[in-house]
Amino acid sequence: MSIQTPEASTGAAVLVLEDGRIFRGQSYGAVGTTLGEAVFTTGMTGYQETITDPSYARQIVVQTAPHIGNTGVNGEDAESRRIWVAGYVVRDPARRPSNWRSEASLDEELVRQGIVGIQGVDTRALTRHLREHKTMRAGIFSGEAAQASDAELLAAVRASEPMEGSRLAEEVSIDEAYVVEPSEHGWEGEPRFTIAAIDLGIKAMTPQRFAERGVRVHVLPATATLEDVKAVNPDGFFMSNGPGDPATADAQVSLLRSVLDEKLPYFGICFGNQILGRALGFGTYKLKYGHRGINQPVLDRRTGKVEITSQNHGFAVDAPMEGATQAPESRFGRVEVSHVSLNDDVVEGLSCLDIPAFSVQYHPEAASGPHDAAYLFDRFIELMEAESGQTNQKDKDA
C-alpha cells in the first residue's frame, strides 16, 4: 500500500527493512510512502515487464542489475494494465532513455502511476542482506515522510501486512471476461482449440503465446466458477501466475478439483502450479528469498535437459521428489515432480500420470526472454489433441 504525490523529486529517501537495517538514497519516481515485502530480482533486462507483472503486487522490488531505465518505457512491452510493484529500488537510474521505441522515461512513468522508489542505494549490499536473512517487510519514505525518526519509520514497517496469509489474486484479476483470438496474432484459419484461462495475475504474453499457436483463449476472472468455465465449452483449462499466498486460494483449489474430476486437460504456471499442488493434496510453503529473475536454471527430469527460465515466486509446493507417488487426493491417481530447481532443489513442475494435467513453477511466456520453456505451450496442445482423440474414439465405440 502507498501514499504518494504525483511529482518527481531528487530529495532524500530512505529504505527501512523490518529487521531495522536502513539504506539511504534519493527519491526516484513518485514522492511519499510505500510499504510492502522487499524482494530482489536478478534480471539484467526486462524491467518494464517486471514492474507490470501482477505477481509483484504488494512487493518492493530491488533490481540487482545496477543500471536501470536505459531503454525507457513504451506501451507495447507492458505485461498488464498498470505497474503493480509497491515500490522500486535501483542503484544507478539512466539519466535519459536511449531507444527508438521509448515513449517516456522510467522515472516519468513511475511518477505518472504514483510508484514510490529510491535510487542511489547499494543494491548489492541490500541483495546480500535479503539473501542471507530472508525477504521481509519494508518501506520507502521520501519527501516529508523521510523526515520522521528511524524509530517511527521502523514502527510503520512492522505494522504493515506480511505476505503470508495475503489473498491478492482477486485484487489484480480482471472484473469481466475477455477473449483473445488466434487471428489477432497471425494465426490463419479456424482456431485449433478453445481454452478457459483463469486470470490470477495473468501477463499479456500468455494468451498471446496460445493464440500464436491457434488457440482461442477465454480469460476469466479469479472468481470464476465451474459453470463459467463450462459456458465457454473449453478443450482445456489454464491457471495463470499471480501474487499472494497459495494457502489462501481455497476457491481456486476447489474449482481446479472440479475441473480435474471432469478430466479436462489442465496446464498451470507459477501460482497455477501451486494450486495444482494443493488440489492434489500437497502443501505449500514460503521460500526464504524466492526465485525472481530471468536466469533461473531448471532440470526437466524427463529429458535431462536444463532450461534457463524466467521466475517470480516466493512460495513453493511441498511434494515428494522420489519418482511417481500417489496423490494425497487419491482420486487423482499418481503424480511426479517433473522439474526441479538446480539452485536449491525446489519443486519446479508437477505432472499427473493418470489424469491430463501438468504445471510448472516458472514462466514459459517470458516476454523479455529466455524462451527455453516455450515448448510447454505445445505440450499442452498435444495433451488436448490426445484427449480429443480419446473422446472421439469413445463416441465411435458408443
Image (cartoon, rainbow, N blue to C red):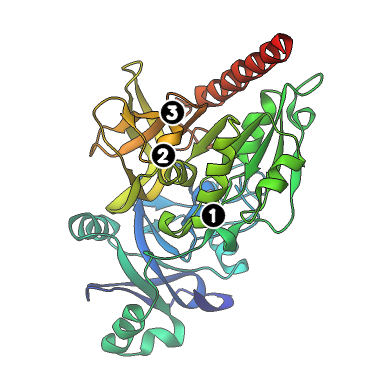
- Disc 1 is placed on an element classified as helix
Inter-mark Cα distance, 3 to 2? 15 Å
Q: Which residue appears at 34% of the width and 54% of the height?
A: 40
- Around disc 1, counting alpha carbons within 10 Å, would you say few (fewer than 14), some (14 to 19), or many (20 or more)? many
Spatial CA distance of label 2 from label 1 is 16 Å
Q: Are marks 3 and 2 in contact (CB under 8 Å)?
A: no
Can residue 43 be seen? no
Please state which of residues 379 and 63 is positioned toward the viewer in this rendering. 379
Q: Earlier in the sequence, mark 3 or mark 2?
A: 3
* Figure check: 289 above or below 165: above
Circle 3 sits on which residue? 352
Q: Is residue 178 above or below residue 268?
A: below
- In the image, 351 versus 73, the foreground residue is 351
Q: Secondary structure at mark 2?
A: loop
Disc 3 marks which amino acid?
Cys
For the point 65% across and 37% down, the residue is 207
Identify the residue at image location x=49%, y=53%. Answer: 55
Residue 246, x across and y down, in percent: 43, 54
Q: Earlier in the sequence, mark 1 or mark 3?
A: 1
245 or 313, nearer to the observer: 245
Residue behind mark 2: 361
Q: Position of residue 341 (x, y in %)?
A: 29, 34
Q: Are marks 1 and 3 in contact (CB under 8 Å)?
A: no
What's the residue type where badge 2 is placed?
Gln
Which residue is tagged 1? 54
